């Protein structure tokens, strides 16, 4: 196994590369956090309209989710709190890899629920939808990039967790390559 440093000052990446990747992770985290917070603060918010308007191969499943008030309440709660918690985790660099994977899955669900494909028209025009690519897909790919860099171990609480698990090693050395 190769040794990899997780110290931002002695990493295999330049300081600017580390800062750029951490900034990307933080910005996406802020977006998730803010979206979750605004949904939690609005007692009338529901995903019913978004899911009911779904088109494409998964539309029947999304309509099924909306068809039962209990299921819809569960979906709404998972959506609101999932966004908020994933956003916090990404901003703090805590459980970064797990949070990134879950955020990618959530964005994939948003994309599949309302894909910007030719021939699909929605009652409410979608901001940032440009035939196949939309803002959800762009953010999904940005998270995919951050998935392969240990940004939480460079700058984040994952670094503290690593130190606590490896007290016998210097803080700048990891025993395994991330991934």
Image (cartoon, helix red, strand yellow):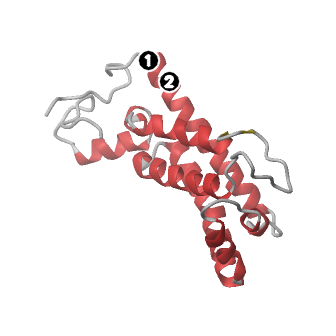
Say the numbered circle drawn on residue 19.
2
Q: Decide which of 95, 50 is in the foreground and name it.
A: 50
**Label 1: how many Cα within 10 Å (few below 14, some 14–19, many 20+):** few
For this view, does 22 lie left or right of residue 166? right
- At x 81% / y 63%, what residue is drawn? 42
Q: What number is the disc on residue 93?
A: none
**Residue 116 position within the rendered picture, expressed as x and y whole percent measured from the top left:** 70, 46
x then y, percent, for residue 17: 46, 20
Q: Quadrant of the C terminus?
A: top left
Which residue is found at the position 24% from the left and 48% from the top? 165
Secondary structure of the residue carrying numbered label 1: helix
Residue at (75% x, 39% y) in the render: 128
User: Quadrant of residue 5 in the image?
Assistant: top left
Residue receiving disc 1: 15
- For disc 2, the neighbor class at 10 Å (few under 14, some 14 to 19, many from 20) is some
84 to the left or right of 10: right
In the rendered image, which quarter is residue 142 located in?
top right
How many marks do you count on the picture? 2
Query: In the image, is 149 to the left or to the right of 126?
Result: left
- 168 horizontally vs 135: left or right: left
Quadrant of the frame with the N terminus: top left
Q: Residue furthest front?
A: 119
Query: Could you say where residue 25 lies in the image, as x and y percent from the top left?
Result: 53, 37
Residue occupying the point 67% across, 83% down: 70
């Amino acid at each position: 196994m190769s040794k990899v440093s997780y110290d931002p000052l002695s990493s295999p990446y330049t300081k600017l590369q580390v800062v750029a990747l951490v900034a990307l992770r933080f910005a996406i985290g802020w977006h998730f956090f803010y979206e979750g917070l605004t949904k939690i603060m609005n007692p009338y918010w529901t995903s019913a309209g978004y899911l009911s308007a779904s088109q494409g191969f998964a539309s029947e499943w999304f309509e099924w989710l909306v068809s039962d008030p209990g299921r819809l309440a569960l979906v709404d709660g998972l959506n609101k709190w999932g966004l908020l918690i994933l956003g916090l985790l990404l901003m703090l660099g805590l459980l970064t890899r797990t949070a990134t994977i879950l955020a990618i899955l959530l964005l994939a669900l948003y994309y599949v629920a309302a894909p910007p494909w030719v021939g699909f028209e929605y009652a409410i025009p979608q901001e940032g939808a440009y035939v196949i690519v939309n803002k959800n897909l762009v953010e999904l790919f940005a998270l995919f990039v951050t998935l392969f860099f240990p940004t939480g171990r460079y700058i984040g609480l994952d670094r503290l967790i690593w130190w606590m698990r490896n007290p016998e090693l210097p803080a700048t050395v990891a025993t395994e390559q991330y991934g």
